[in-house]
Image (cartoon, rainbow, N blue to C red):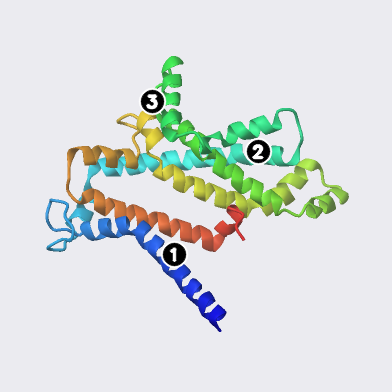
Amino acid sequence: MPAKLVSKGLKVLGYLVVAGILGFVLLPAIVVTVASFNQSAILAFPPKELSWRWYINAFSYADFGHGLRNSLVVTFWGSSIALLVGGAFGYALFRYEFRFRRTLEMILLSPLVIPQFTIGLGLLMLASMISVPRTYPLVVFTHTVIVLPFVLRSVFISLQNFNTRYESVAASLGASPGRVLTTVTIPLLLPGLLSGWLFAAILSFNEFTATLFVANQATHTLPVAMYNYVREYADPTLAALSVVYILATAGLLLAANAIFGLDKVFNVD
């Protein structure tokens, strides 16, 4: 009986610890959400009066609209290029043995451990040395480099769960290697590829540190526009936009989990 009480007490304690950790992590988001409804132009918590004025300001501010358009363009192209490059490299690295295979894999995954500050500054210096302007191609390339490891991870997990007997059956029926790849392998890997693209798109859309170095006034993304705004104003507009950001990102992640299953992308049982 005492052993059961101890076990039950530890279980309850575990739930309380997890709830406490979640509450601590979510507390800043809760404070920002409440403060975003402040009627006053001074960011204060708790607000004395509630208002939607800062949400209206966030959606009507021209610089945010320009940054949003740039973010959508950069996110689409950066994630799509990362999908093509990461899918090809991921397939080759997983299926074939060749010289410097491990070295190539480490290079492609290196953005996971290299600070984004270093990536942005390094690409800015490289672009300056070879006279590449700070236009869309440079920003897209930067985002591609940053999100590429996540696409590779998704491809690796999809290939680990892939049943190669389907390919063998197709080959035994006379299908060429190219036909097997396009009609069997890629369609079966498509859920993993799409989930990798979606996760890369979310990361690309929220990328700020490296983008700050490589973007200019014409190509700055929404996170950079938010940074520029907070340097000039101190009203709750940024808090309102942050709430929209949080809800949009959470909605996309929930949709990705419901459709593709993020546990498979991260190889979590």
Check disc 1 and give the amino acid type: Val
* CA distance for labels 3 and 2: 28 Å
Mark with earlier residue (3, 1): 1
Query: x and y percent of residue 187 in the render?
Result: 68, 52
Identify whether 229 is placed above or below 49. above
Residue 18 is labelled as 1
Query: x and y percent of residue 180 in the render?
Result: 77, 47
| Residue at x 56%, y 52% (from the top left corner) | 195
| Residue at x 12%, y 51% (from the top left corner) | 41
* Residue 39 appears left or right of 7: left
* CA distance for labels 1 and 2: 40 Å
Where is mark 2, residue-wise?
88
Mark with earlier residue (3, 2): 2
Check disc 3 and give the amino acid type: Arg
* Residue 218 appears left or right of 16: left
The residue mark sitting in front, 3 or 1, is: 1
Where is mark 3, residue-wise?
134
| Residue at x 42%, y 32% (from the top left corner) | 139
Identify whether 157 is placed above or below 224. below
